[in-house]
Amino acid sequence: MSSHADSIQQAVQLASKPKVLIIGPTPPPYNGMSLATELLLNAVEDEFCVIHLDTADRRGLSNVGRIDFRNVLLAAYHGLKYFSLLLLKNPKIVYVQIAQDRLAFLRDSLFLIPARLLGKKVIVHLHGGYFATFYRSTSGPTQRLIRYCLGKSARAIVLGKSLGSMFEGILPAERIRVIPNGIPDYFGDKRCCPGNGHRRTVLFLSTLMREKGTLDVLAAMPTIAERISDVQAIFAGEWYRPEDQIAAQETISSLGLAAHVKFVGTVSPPFKYDLLSQADVFVLPSYNEGQPYAVLEAMAAGLPVISSGVGCIPETVIDGENGFILKPGSKEALVDKLALLLGDEQLRKKMGEASRQRFLENYRFDRFAGDIGQVFREALFQD
C-alpha cells in the first residue's frame, strides 16, 4: 500500500513541476554534444518535468553533419515527434543546443521557429566559440533567419566571458548568461600517479581529425621521441574522415613512429578514466573549440594540459599555471612544451595539482547544475 501511495505522491509532484522540452543527442556515440545533453538532463531532472527529444544518430561520429537518406528520415522523424511533443505535452520551456554552420542551423531553425510561433520560452545553448564568425560570414537571408529564430529567446548560454559577444546584434546582453561546462568528479582521490617503469605518456582524447590537431601531435612525436626515448602518445577517439586516418597512417609509417604511437579507438567509462589517470600530459591543440569536456576531465584527473588559445580554453587552462596555451598550428611550440613537461617531473606535478584545483573550484557538476537551474527559472518567470 505504501508503495502505491509513494507512486501517487511522485506522480503528483511530477505534475506540479514546470514542463521543459530538451532537444539534443545522448550517447552513444560519445562526443561533446551528446555528453552535454546527458549532463543537462541530470542537472534539471529534479526541479523540472523533463521531456526529452533525443536527436542522436547511433551509427557513429562519421555520420554527424552528413546528408544521406537515413539522415533525412531521422530528421523527418525528429521533426514529427517534436511537433507532437509541443502540442501534446505543452512544455513551458524549449531548450536547443544551437549549431555554428549554415546547414546545421537550418536544422535547428525547424525547432526554434515553431517554439517562437507557439509562444514558448526558448533557451539556446552555444557550446562553441565560432558563432559570431559564422553569423558575420553568412548570407543576408541566413542572417535574417538567425535573427528571427534567436531574437526572442528568453536566455542564451555561452561557455565563457570571452564568448559573451557571440550574439551581438541578435540578442540584448541582459539575456545572455555565462555558464562554463561542469562535470562530475570522476576521480576524487583515485588519481594514479605514474611511477618508476612507467612510459611517459601523452594522451589525446577527442574526435580524431585535422581540426582537433591530431596530425599536429603525430608530427611532433619524432622530435619528442629523440629527446625522450620511453615516450608514447595514446590517441583515444573515433576517426571523423577516412582521409585523415590515411594521412596519419602514412605519417606513422614514414617517420617510424609505430613504437611510440597507439590508437585505442572510441573509449567510454571506465576505460577513459583509466587512460586519464595513467597519463602524464594531456594535449588537444585544436583549431576551433568551445570548452572541451576532455580538457575538464584531464584537469579533474590532475593532468597538465597543452591546448590552443581558441574558444574559452584560455579561461580554463591558465598559461604557465596548469598547462600551456599555444597558437593553433604552432607545431614548434607544441614540441617545446611537450618536451618541457615530459622532461620535468616536478613541473608536471605542480601543473597537475593546479589543474585539479581549478577543476574543483570552477568546473564541478554541482556548480554547473545550480547555474543551469537558475537560468531555467529566469526564463520561466520572464515576462
Image (tube, rainbow, N blue to C red):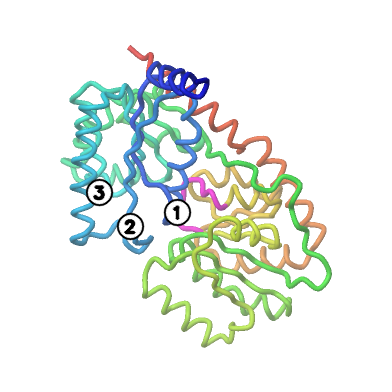
Residue that numbered label 1 is attached to: 31
- Using residue 267 as the reference point, say whether residue 77 is left or right of it: left
Determine whether the residue tagged by mark 1 lies in a helix, strand or loop: loop
Magenta segment range? Answer: 286-294
Reading the chain from its start, which is encountered first: label 2 or label 3?
2
Residue 358 forms part of the magenta stretch? no
Report, in whole angstroms, how far the alpha carbon at label 2 lies from the one at label 1.
10 Å
- Using residue 216 as the reference point, say whether residue 83 is left or right of it: left
Give the mark toward the camera: 3 or 1. 1
Above or below, comparing residue 166 to residue 285 in the picture: above
- What is the magenta segment's predominant secondary structure? loop
Amino acid type of the residue that numbered disc 3 sits on in the rendered structure: Arg
Q: Residue at x 40, y 16 (%)?
A: 16
Q: Residue at x 19, y 54 (%)?
A: 72
Residue that numbered label 3 is attached to: 102
Report, in whole angstroms, how far the alpha carbon at label 2 lies from the one at label 3.
14 Å
Q: Quadrant of residue 24?
A: top left
Above or below, comparing residue 351 to residue 369 in the picture: below
Amino acid type of the residue that numbered disc 1 sits on in the rendered structure: Asn
Q: Nearer the viewer, residue 329 or 201?
A: 201
Q: Quadrant of residue 282?
A: bottom right
Circles 2 and 1 in contact, beta carbons < 8 Å: yes
Task: Please state the horizontal and vertical placement of residue 339, each as a whole percent of the image.
Answer: 70, 68
